[in-house]
Image (spheres, helix red, strand yellow):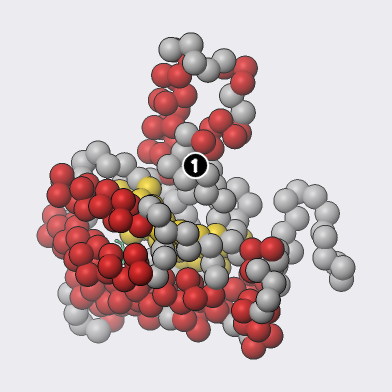
Amino acid sequence: MTASVQREALSGVHPHERAAFPRHVAIIMDGNGRWAKERGLPRTEGHRQGVETLRRIVRHAAKLGISCLTLYSFSSENWTRPEAEVSFLMGLLQRFVRRDLAELVKANIKVRVIGSREGLSPSIASLLDEAEAATRGNSGMELVVAFNYGARDELTRAMRKIAADVAAGRLDPAKIDESVIASRLDTADLPDPDLIIRTSGEQRLSNFLLWQAAYAEFFFPRFNWPDFDEKAFDEALSVFAARDRRYGGLSQKADA
Ligand code: IPE
Ligand code: IPE
Ligand code: MG
């Protein structure tokens, strides 16, 4: 981030009141395997390093005043990986929660987990519940962990809820609008992501926030996730600040 953007970000105006500052940043943390391969290490080492990056970025985003940070940690399609890698990733999540929950509580960060709880082991599911419960009263940055998350799965579950409400006579089909749909998604009550960052140079969504990303800005740094750092995050914020978001309308920028 340039010095001026940083100054602005940290100045008296609450960052959320300024359009140039994203309220909600979502990150597709990709490239752990490639990072490890480049160094002749096992893929698991890339995942381990990836958690270190995650911890740094969570702290940094909270410090900057980002109100919501979503991290794509495990997709509903990642189950197709070799069993040893999947169980390593499950173990890593458990270690992260055990090791960092106290610090998250202290930092006033509120944890929310999106994705399906189905298919998760009871011990992981209860650990996720514990992280949410322990931070429920916090009022600072919302840390949304997308775990066992796939947007098509999320939309499918939302449609089932809507269908059940209609079948039970609680919902009139004519009243189904965008807000009804949004309220049945895992992200209910969260703002849509303003900025989606995907590391590793890959430029695709891979089933991430398909509904919510309708007007998101994208940033694709070439770094693999373990090499992503505070400076790269700041750069994403300055690129975002220079974007002209039109939402199908006309530019609101004075110089456009
Ligand atoms: C992202 O890194 C972490 C997860 C998907 C869990 P990858 O494991 O996808 O790393 P690459 O893309 O194979 O390099
Ligand atoms: C997306 O990365 C999921 C996460 C980062 C958790 P993938 O590595 O699974 O995506 P593809 O397979 O390259 O599309
Ligand atoms: Mg990948």
Q: Residue at 55% across / 70% down in the picture?
A: 65
Q: Secondary structure at mark 1?
A: loop
Ligand 2 closer than 8 Å to the CB at disc 1? no
Q: Residue at x 35, y 69 (%)?
A: 106
Expressed as whole percent of the image width and height from the top left, the position of residue 173 reads 57, 17
Given residues 213 and 221, the one toward you in this image is 213
Considering every residue shown, the one lying at the far front of the view is 137
Q: Is residue 155 above or below residue 66?
A: above
Q: Locate residue 168: give its quadrant.
A: top left
Q: Is residue 221 above or below residue 123?
A: below
Residue where numbered disc 1 is placed: 188
Task: State the image coordinates of residue 193 (x, y, percent, origin top left).
Answer: 55, 55
- For label 1, count other residues whose C-alpha is less than 10 Å away and answer few (under 14), some (14-19) or many (20+): few
Q: Residue at x 33, y 52 (%)?
A: 132
Give percent across and percent down for residue 128: 26, 52
Quarter holding residue 56: bottom left
Q: Is residue 124 left or right of residue 159?
A: left
Camera sees residue 84: yes
As displayed, is residue 128 above or below residue 107?
Answer: above
| Quarter of the figure that contains the C terminus | bottom right
Amino acid on which the number 1 mark rests in the picture = Ala
88 or 78, which is in the foreground? 88
Res 242 → quadrant: bottom right
- Figure quadrant of the N terminus: bottom right
Residue with the most extreme bottom position:
3
* Drawn side of residue 166 relative to residue 81, left or right: right
Q: Is residue 82 left or right of residue 182?
A: left
Q: Which percent across, then down, holds residue 236?
A: 56, 74
Viewer-proximal residue, 186 or 104? Answer: 104
Q: How many marks?
A: 1
